[in-house]
Each structure stands twice: as C-alpha cells, then as structure tokens.
Amino acid sequence: MSSLAGPLLGNDPVERFIHRLSLFEPLDAEAREALRRAVNRGPLIPPLQELHPEAFGDVSVLLSGWICHFRLLTNGRRQITAMVVPGDFVDFGFLSGTVATAQCVTTAHSQLGRIRTRTFTELAAQFPAILRASQRAAATDAAIGRERIISLGVRTATERLASILCELWYRLSAVGLTSAEGSYDLPMTQAELGAAVGLSTVHVNRTLQVLRRTGAISLQSGKVWIRDLRKLTALAGFDPVYLSLEP
Amino acid sequence: MSSLAGPLLGNDPVERFIHRLSLFEPLDAEAREALRRAVNRGPLIPPLQELHPEAFGDVSVLLSGWICHFRLLTNGRRQITAMVVPGDFVDFGFLSGTVATAQCVTTAHSQLGRIRTRTFTELAAQFPAILRASQRAAATDAAIGRERIISLGVRTATERLASILCELWYRLSAVGLTSAEGSYDLPMTQAELGAAVGLSTVHVNRTLQVLRRTGAISLQSGKVWIRDLRKLTALAGFDPVYLSLEP
DNA sequence: CGGACCCTTGAGAGCGGTCAAGACTAGTGG
DNA sequence: CCACTAGTCTTGACCGCTCTCAAGGGTCCG
C-alpha cells in the first residue's frame, strides 16, 4: 500500500524530495548524499504569495506546502495549469536552459529547496542517474499536463474532480503525505479547485457534494478522505499509469 | 515577415527540420551536416494511419504531413492532446529514456525521419547545441500544452479556434509552410478540430462561420487563409511568446 | 463581537451538446 | 464521362450541463 511510504520516509522534506526522485530512477547512497549537500533550504513562504521567476531561478524544489502554476487572462479569468506538491520540482526550465515563464503562487505555507544551476550541472555530470531522474520527472510532468488536457476537453465535472482527487492521492502517497486512514491535506479553496479543473466555484461545490453522497470521499477543513478509492477511480475513469509510480 | 522563410528554406524536409531546430539554438555547419547524415527518411504513410510506438521508436521527426497525439476514452470520447507539424519531433520520450505512451495518428500523407537513439546520443555528446535545441523543443512543446490547458479551461469556443489557428500560423510560418498570401494547409476535418479544442463538430462549424463572417479568416478545401491576423489575434487573446519563435 | 473569507443553496440564463436531415465534395467504378 | 457512394460540411430544433447572479450560513481570527 502506497501510504506505507509515510512511516518509512521520515519527515525530513529533503529526504522526501530525494525519495521522490529515486522513484524515477534509483539513486545510490553517494548520489543521495551529494543531493543532500546540494539542496539549500529556503525560507518559509506564506500562502497566496506569488513567486517570481527570480524567486525560483536555479533549480527549485518544493520541500513542503503547495504551489500552483497559473495564468491570468486579460478578462480576469484564471486557469491553474499545474499543481506542485512536496517533492516535486517547481519548474523544469533548468533542463532546457530556459527561464520559467509561468506564474506561480503558494496556496499554503511553503518552503522551497534550491540547487544552484551550476551545482546541478555538476551533479548531473557526476551522477547520470540524477539527470535521468530529473528528465523522467519532467516527462511525468508533461504526462500530467496531457491528462489535464483530456480532463478539460472531454470529461464531465464529476469525472474531472474525481480524477484530480485520484491523481493527488497517488502523488501524495508517493511522498508519504497520505494518512493510513486514507486522507490527505488539500490546501486549496473550492474556487481554486475550480480554476484547476475549469469549473465555476458553484459547480465545484455541487459536484463535490455528489462525490460525497456517493460515499467516494468526504471533506473537512482542507482535508480529503478517500472513502472508496475504487468507486472514485471508476467515477473518474482514472488510470494511474501516466504517473509512472510503479516501476 | 515570417512567411519569407518559405523561399529561403527550400523544400527539402530534412533541411526544414534542421532549420526548425536551429531556431531553438543556433547550429553550426558541422552540426547541421551531422544531422543530415543522421536522419533516415522513412516511407510515406497514408492518412488516418495509427502510429504504434515501435513505429516511432528511436528519435522520430515529422518530415512532412500531419500527426495528432490523441487519447480515446472508454466512453468513445476522443481528445487530441497535441498536433505535430513538419519539422517537429513526434515525441520527446527520447530525452528521458521513456517509451512514448501516447497514441498517434496521421491526418495527411506523412513522412517520418528517424535517428537511431544510439546515433542521437552520440550527436548530443558531440554537438551540445543539438541537445540544447532538442531540450528547448521539448520545453516549447510543454508550453504549447499549457496553452491548450488554458484554452480548454477558460476560453470560449471562438477564442479556442482563433487561438489554434493563430498558433498554427506561427508554427507553420517558422518552417516555411505558409504562403505569401497568408494561407496554410490544415489537413484536419472539423470533427478532428473539435477533438483538439474540446468542442462538438457542429459547434466547430458554427464557430468557424463566425470567424469567417468577421473577415478574420476564410476556409476552402483544407486550406486556411488568415485574412486579418490582427483581428484573429484579438479574437483569440493570442500572444505568440510561448512559441519562443523570436530569439 | 465583528469582519472577511469560504462554503452552500436557489433561481434563471446561456453556451455548447445532441439528434437529425439535407447539401456539398471527392473519390470509385462502370 | 457519368452515376454512385462515403465522408464532410451545413443548418435547424431542442436539450442540458454548467455559468452567473444573489443571498444566507459557517468558520476562523482579530
């Protein structure tokens, strides 16, 4: 069971990141140690703070908290294009030498880990596994993006919300952030969820009620309980392969 | 004017690919020559043929024609997640050593160019510019994906179609596939367009009529004329920066 | 206790979907 | 060269999922 990763992981956020990376590609003790030394822990950032590209230049990793990539259209409409959970890279610009162009905002108290670009280049040269793991992380990020396209394009409101809750369950399980009782913290308002899945706040609310009434989930103060993963998966038409969590 | 790239480019599809790559990162004569030798021209593939991952293993490039990445849901609904135009890589799995998981289908007579993975690895080592160009291509592909998310999430039918027509105008201009009179070939049916922008065939039809009536575009037998790029851009709320075509 | 933000609920409107049928086009075979 | 056919484009009518507007209730925090 994925949630067992929790106790095994301990609670150091840098270890969590290293663990996450090693799921993409096994890392030996030496590579792990090099990573530990390379990651600088940043300050705590309050919720709803926008991160400017300079703020996550270098190679940035989310150690704890929650970050959303979003875009604000001229007419005021907002779309969240990606959700970054602890253990994830904030942005993959470093792999192509391009500067991040996306806007990012925290939705919870968050802490970044940073690796100087120069240091990362050396790490990548010395430990090919670290480079490969990062590339696979980027590929998975792209796969998640495609999944979002599919959700927004052809899935109903219920399917979209069920999908994203399933996805988060698997992603958070991989970094030990789901509880044994089947819950996880989701520090997003219903309005923010709507901006992520392309629905209005009102409709998110009504749709979540449907999911609750079917007994698939329950919600309480920023926490999601997955009451029946099988039912939720069925409602979503969800298949976790794209997250490539089972090597 | 971007369409001037046409005459300058000549009509060899391998040169087109090299030109496209060089827009991401300048390539010297030696690198270009190495690429020329590395690319194997594949056979002509008829329209509506599905490409299986083995068919574009290695590193595959679309030399001519048109390819769509898509996903078929269990309920029969289909979503096109990406459009590959000549000069583009078909898939970026080679950068992370993962096998392509996406389904691909041709929508026109197409020809692939292939570089053996081993050969590409050598090329990348010998010519860092080629590797960087490929990585930037992948980053741009991701940016196009994000743009699609935004379209599907918060844009109206008119905006979505105007956006995609704008995007294709710029992408095709970059590889000399737009005419001086402002037209390009779009080998997709309205049903396929709908699968790409998340609209029903009927609504695509009606929405295209709106775009025609405003004088922004005209359509005829698989050809799109951009009659008023400024108007189309305004209707779409389009900004081509994400395509990173102006270095 | 007050205020701000979030969640919830109701009512009505609209964008886009579905169903269905006719018109057009291109490719096929006689 | 001309039917014939299949696929695509087009149009109309109706439906429904989701949006917008609006207001009430909860909850957290100052």
Image (cartoon, coloured by chain):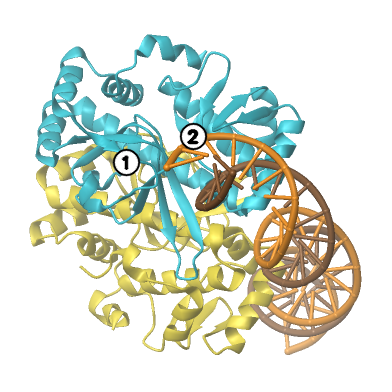
Chain colours: A cyan, B yellow, C brown, D orange
Q: Give the quadrant of residue B246.
A: bottom left
The reply to the same-chain question for discs 2 and 1 is yes
**Residue at left 20%, top 36%?**
A114
Q: Give the quadrant of residue A16.
A: top left
Q: Which of labels 2 and 1 is toward the front?
A: 1
Would residue B219 appear left or right of A203 to someone viewing this image?
Answer: left
Q: Give the quadrant of residue A122.
A: top left
| Residue B134 vertical position relative to residue B187 in the rendered view, above or below | above
| Residue B134 vertical position relative to residue B101 in the rendered view, above or below | below
Q: Secondary structure at mark 2?
A: helix
Chain at tag 1: A
Dot 2, crowdedness within 10 Å: few (<14), some or many (≥20)? some
Q: Quadrant of the C terminus of chain A?
A: top left
**Residue at left 49%, top 56%?**
A79
User: Which residue, given by chain and number where applicable, does mark 1 sit on?
Assistant: A90
Percent of width and height locating residue A31: 18, 20
Which residue is more in the foreground, A239 or A229?
Answer: A229
Percent of width and height locating residue A158: 69, 42
Would residue B189 appear left or right of A25 to someone viewing this image?
Answer: right
**Residue at left 48%, top 88%?**
B227
Percent of width and height locating residue C16: 68, 65
Would residue A161 appear left or right of B8 to someone viewing this image?
Answer: right
Q: Is residue B103 visible?
A: no
Residue A19 tag number: none
Which residue is more in the foreground, B141 or A155?
Answer: A155
Q: Earlier in the sequence, mark 2 or mark 1?
A: 1
Identity of the amino acid at label 1? Val
Residues at discs 2 and 1 in contact (Cβ within 8 Å): no
User: Which residue, given by chain and number where applicable, does mark 2 sit on?
Assistant: A242
